[in-house]
Image (cartoon, helix red, strand yellow):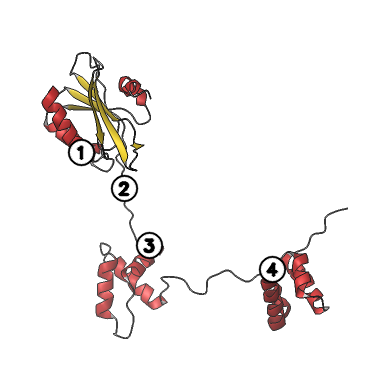
Amino acid sequence: MPWKECSVVEERLRFVARLLDGEAMTDVCREFGISRKTGYKIFDRYSEHGLKALSDRSRRPVRYANQLPQQLESLIIDAKRNKPHWGARKIRELLVRRLDGDIRVPAKSTIHAVLDRHGLVQRMSRRRNRARGTALSQGAAPNDLWCADFKGEFKLGNGRYCYPLTVSDHASRFLLLCEALESTREDLACTAFERLFRDRGLPMAIRSDNGVPFASPNALFNLSKLSVWWLRLGIAIERIKPGQPQQNGRHERMHLT
C-alpha cells in the first residue's frame, strides 16, 4: 500500500475541521503532535482570515536594518561616485550640511552598509605573517647553538600556573636554564635570559618554536621584543617549522616529549 502524501495546509485543514466538529483542543493537539499554543494560533488565524490563513506566512522581515528612503540612498551613492576616495564619515558630514534639519541623518555605519551593498567599498586583504621556519645550523660545538622552549604549564597547589622555561646547549646537551615563570610574558623571559647571558655568555644562535615570547604572529617577520633583543646582541635566530617539533628534537627529548 503506497504512503499517503499530504501537505502542511491539508494537515492544518484537518486539524481545524476536527475542532469545528466539537473535539477538545487538548486531544486534537496531542494527536497532531503540536502544543496547545500552536493549536490556538492556527484556529484563531482560520477564524479571522479563513482558508488562506492556513498557508505558510512569509518569513520576510517587516523592516530591514539600515534601510533608507530611496532618495537619501541615491544621494549617498552619488556622493561616493563623485568622490570615490571619500568614506562614510565624510559623506555623512556632507549630508549634515545639505539636508534639512527635520531629516534625520543616517549613522556612519548605515552609510557604510549602503555603500557596501552597492559594491562601492574596496576591501583590503590583510596579509598574515605566517611562520615558515628558518634555516637551521648544525650546532656542532658548545655555545654554537642554544635551544629554548617552555616545557608546558602545570597548576600549582595554590591554584596558580607555572611555566618552566628551559634552555639547553645543542652540542653538549647541557641544561643551561630551567626557571619557573608565572607566565610566558616577554619581560619575564628577558629577565631570565639576561641572567643566563651574564652567567654563560652569548651563543652564536638560539633555536626555538614560533610561539610567544620567542616570536610574535602579528609583527614584522614575526619578530618579538625578545627576538629583536637577541638580534641586537648579535645572536642569530633559528625557528623550526610549525608542526615539526622534531627539528628541535634534542631539546624535546630532554622534555621527554
Give me the C-alpha separation between circle 4 and circle 2. Answer: 51 Å
In the image, what residue type sits under mark 4?
Answer: Ser
Res. 96 mark: none
Give me the C-alpha separation between circle 2 and circle 3. Answer: 18 Å
Sequence-first disc among 4 and 1: 4
Give me the C-alpha separation between circle 1 and circle 2. Answer: 31 Å
* Residue bearing the label numbered 3: 116
* Residue bearing the label numbered 1: 188
Callout in the foreground (4, 2): 4
Residue 118 showing in the rendered view: no
Sequence-first disc among 3 and 4: 4
Q: Where is residue 12 in the image (x, y as percent from the top left)?
A: 74, 70
In the image, what residue type sits under mark 2?
Answer: Arg
Q: Where is residue 127 in the image (x, y as percent from the top left)?
A: 31, 44
* Residue bearing the label numbered 2: 126
**Which one is nearer the viewer's eye here, 134 or 125?**
134
Circle 4 crowding by C-alpha within 10 Å: few under 14, some 14–19, many from 20: some
Sequence-first disc among 1 and 2: 2
Classify residue 238 as left or right of residue 63: left
Sequence-first disc among 2 and 3: 3
Circle 1 crowding by C-alpha within 10 Å: few under 14, some 14–19, many from 20: some
